Amino acid sequence: GARLVLWDFDGPVCRLFAGYSADRVAAALVDWLEKAGLKELLPPEERDHPDPHVLLGAVHRSHPKDLVDEFEERLTREELRAVPGARPTAYADPLIRAWAALGVGLAITTNNSPRAVREYLATRGLLGCFAPHIYGRTQDPHLLKPDPYCLDRALDAMRVPPAKALMIGDSPADVAAARKAGVPFLGYARNDRKAEQLRSAGAPVLVDSLEAVLGVVRR
């Protein structure tokens, strides 16, 4: 019964770094900071963190906006390099097309760059199912999920009350953002580790495949 489905991108729609590891991206960004003489900006426990968004947040907390902007742009370029090797999540493409055919609104709400999202969706012929409702990372890391900023933007733009929407996500940050926005949440957990993370974060419903969701929508 959802009038709007908010999709996290990296996970539910595709594995962005399937062919271009997020660890590799994080290492490249740390290496750039080191060459610039700025590696000390990062606490030791974050220098080897596999999540590039953690690195972006660390730089944001400790340095002026011009460096944050350059760091974010470098992260965006790395995500764009990852797009050709991204692996579609099983059943995501037909589920997106089925919901679109039924007239359900679709939006992307992600911590990834909207440029990378558009590039990927275009390669799959799915851009028309979402555009212009792609709400991704801005140059203000404070607004990354778990902040509900990108969800609120989608709800406001599409004029749908939170209770009539649904978010599909695969991380504790997605759970928290949906809760803050008042949006019902469906967790996608492709392995046991993801499932445990989502349960611990309070996700009420989990699926390990989108096939079941596609079956419900088609019925």
Image (spheres, grey):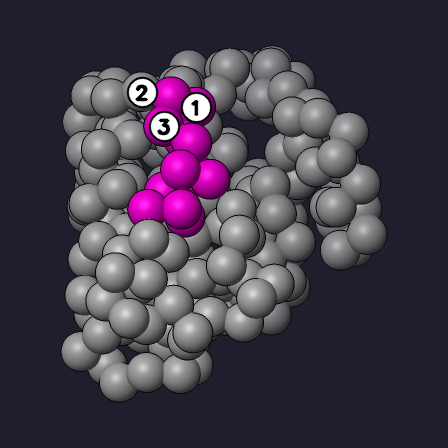
Q: Residues within 10 Å of mark 3 (few under 14, many from 20)?
A: some
Label placed on residue 20: 3
Q: CA distance from mark 1 to mark 3?
A: 6 Å
- In the picture provided, is 109 more to the left or to the right than 170? left
Considering depth in this image, is 139 or 97 the residue closer to the camera?
139
- Mark 3 and mark 2 lie on one chain; the one further toward the N terminus is 3
Q: Mark 1: which secondary structure? A: loop
Label placed on residue 18: 1
Q: Is residue 94 magenta?
A: no
Which residue bears the numbered disc 2?
85
Q: Mark 2: which secondary structure? A: helix
- Mark 1 and mark 2 lie on one chain; the one further toward the N terminus is 1
Give coordinates of residue 192: x percent, y percent: 77, 29
Q: Can see residue 106?
A: yes
Q: Mark 3: which secondary structure? A: loop
Q: Residue 98's quadrant in the figure?
A: top left
State the residue at coordinates (60%, 41%).
170
Asked if the residues shown at circle 1 and circle 2 are in contact, with their CB atoms under 8 angstroms apart, the answer is: yes
Q: Vertical placement of 181 versus 30: above or below?
A: below
Give coordinates of residue 5: x percent, y percent: 46, 43
Going by the numbered disc 3, the residue's amino acid type is Tyr
Q: Residues within 10 Å of mark 1 (few under 14, many from 20)?
A: some
Which corner quadrant holds the N terminus? Answer: top right
Q: Can see residue 137?
A: no
Q: Nearer the viewer, mark 3 or mark 2?
A: 3
Asked if the residues shown at circle 3 and circle 2 are in contact, with their CB atoms under 8 angstroms apart, the answer is: yes
The residues colored magenta run: 17-29
Label placed on residue 47: none
Give coordinates of residue 58: x percent, y percent: 45, 71
Considering depth in this image, is 125 or 216 the residue closer to the camera?
125
Going by the numbered disc 1, the residue's amino acid type is Ala
